Amino acid sequence: MEIQFLGAAREVTGSCYLFQVGKHRFLVDCGLIQGTFEHEKKNWAAFPFDARKLDAVVLTHAHLDHSGRLPMLVKEGFRGFIYTHRATAALCRVMLQDAAYLNAEETERFNRYRARNGQDLIEPLYDQDDVYTTERHFQPLDYGESTEIVPGATLTLHDAGHILGSAIVELELSEDGVTRRVVLSGDLGHAGAPILNDPTALTEADLVVMESTYGDRCHRSWEATWAELGDIIRSAHAGKGNILVPAFAVGRAQELLYALARHYDEWEVRDWHVFLDSPMAIETTELYRRFHGLYDRAARAAMKSNNGDPFSMRNLRLTKTAEESMHINDIRAGAIVIAGSGMCTGGRIVHHLKRNLAHEHCHVIIAGFQARGTLGRTLVDGAKTVHLFGEDIPVRAQIHTVGGLSAHADQAGLAAWYGNFKKRPPLALVHGEPEAMDALATHLREKFQATVRCPEPGQRLSLAGLDSA
Ligand SMILES: [Zn+2]
């Protein structure tokens, strides 16, 4: 009985953990590696296991750094079920199709580079057909429902409060009369975040595998975050410039819409034209509406008081087509544009940035995690010039980092969630840059006297032998 840390080990993306119980093997997550060009090339590497011999997959949530390599698994012969929350299965339909499309574009970019260097050309990771095939493998579950996924492994999903359908994975594993309970946090939500519930507190585990994205940071309080966002919007005069908000289509975009609708008068949102400029964010918002049973109490109340839809506003426009998006590009002032991608690595936001960054009255609100090597990170780090579509664009716009809006728990949140476990089970930290992970490890050792590991990529950990470790 063991776990092998195949991805998001000492880094943030590419989540992938291989479990072996008796003769059976299953994965938790099968995510894309995201970041720099060099980094993303690793997605083309073969899996270090035979996909045909995997019995099942458990998916924590729909973000591509957790789900984005699933179609490759299926393409390579995986025939089992992909167990996940039903909202995640619905979201994955949207996200994986988009991923296939983006990957086709990216492959072309790689191939231009490879052709220049005399290297063989590569194929896209997968196409739309592979995504359709993958969808047939989903086995949707509800929170709290226990299912035997392979002989000797029972799965229960719990609300992680990170994005719609996100789950903490609880596994009860048995082999040769030994039983181990392993809990994987998945991406753990930020308590108090809008729309969704706070992460579920669990109390029993023999091993906790926990994310550490913000392991070295504390977010601002929610009150301070809303006040900050309101101040930026009120002080940006609608007549002078635009407000650009790069946003992940899933989660962040809905939180922003929800916040704008809730603070409509207070933030003077009525003076602006609000655009949700992302087909994927528009589809996702539809799914957030459909799965309203997963809302927290405040969102249920907002739904009632806002005509059954907590996201709607009089001056909100949903721009699906590229043509509509280009029209926004012509607006010099008075637009709040929420567009993908969240780290400005592609998508419509890059066009809006190109048009607006040189204007001193433009405001860019960075409201999510920005990985190293991304345009978003470059802006946060204070670059004076950025290179976009072959042009050097001076950055005169005001860049605001609103860290408190994160969809991830901060150091205090992670420690508090771990603190719910009785008997302080050993921890393995994953899904974080080394500095964040190491800071969290130190904090948890000091606070709880916990045994904390930070596994290296490929490292195995015997579950039966945990006590003696
Ligand atoms: Zn996530």
Image: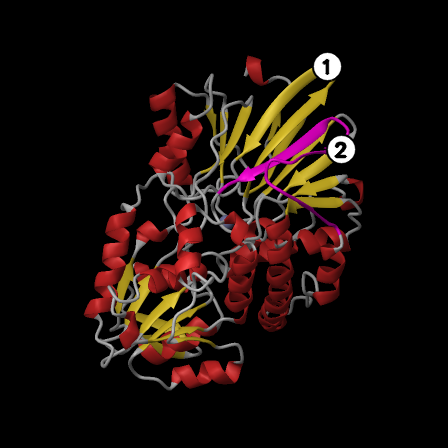
Checking the image for residue 177, the label placed there is 1
Q: Quadrant of residue 447?
A: top left
Residue 63 location in percent, x, y?
55, 53
Checking the image for residue 150, the label placed there is 2
In the picture, measured across the screen, residue 167 lies left or right of residue 121, that is left
Q: In this picture, which residue range is highlighted in magenta? A: 137-160
Q: Main secondary structure of the magenta part?
A: strand
Q: How is the image coloured?
A: secondary structure
Residue 376 location in percent, x, y?
38, 62
Q: Specify whether tag 1 is near ligand 1 (CB below 8 Å).
A: no
Q: Earlier in the sequence, mark 2 or mark 1?
A: 2
Q: Residues within 10 Å of mark 2 (few under 14, many from 20)?
A: some
Residue 15 seen in render = yes
- What's the residue type where badge 1 is placed? Gly
Residue 329, compared with residue 404, is above or below; it is below
* Residue 436 forms part of the magenta stretch: no
Residue 27 location in percent, x, y?
67, 40
Instruction: Between residue 240 and residue 103, name the one nearer to us.
Output: 240
Instruction: Give the quadrant of the C terminus.
Output: top right
**Point 73% across, 20% down: residue:** 175
Residue 153 location in percent, x, y?
70, 29
Residue 451, compared with residue 392, is above or below; it is above
Residue 463 seen in render = no
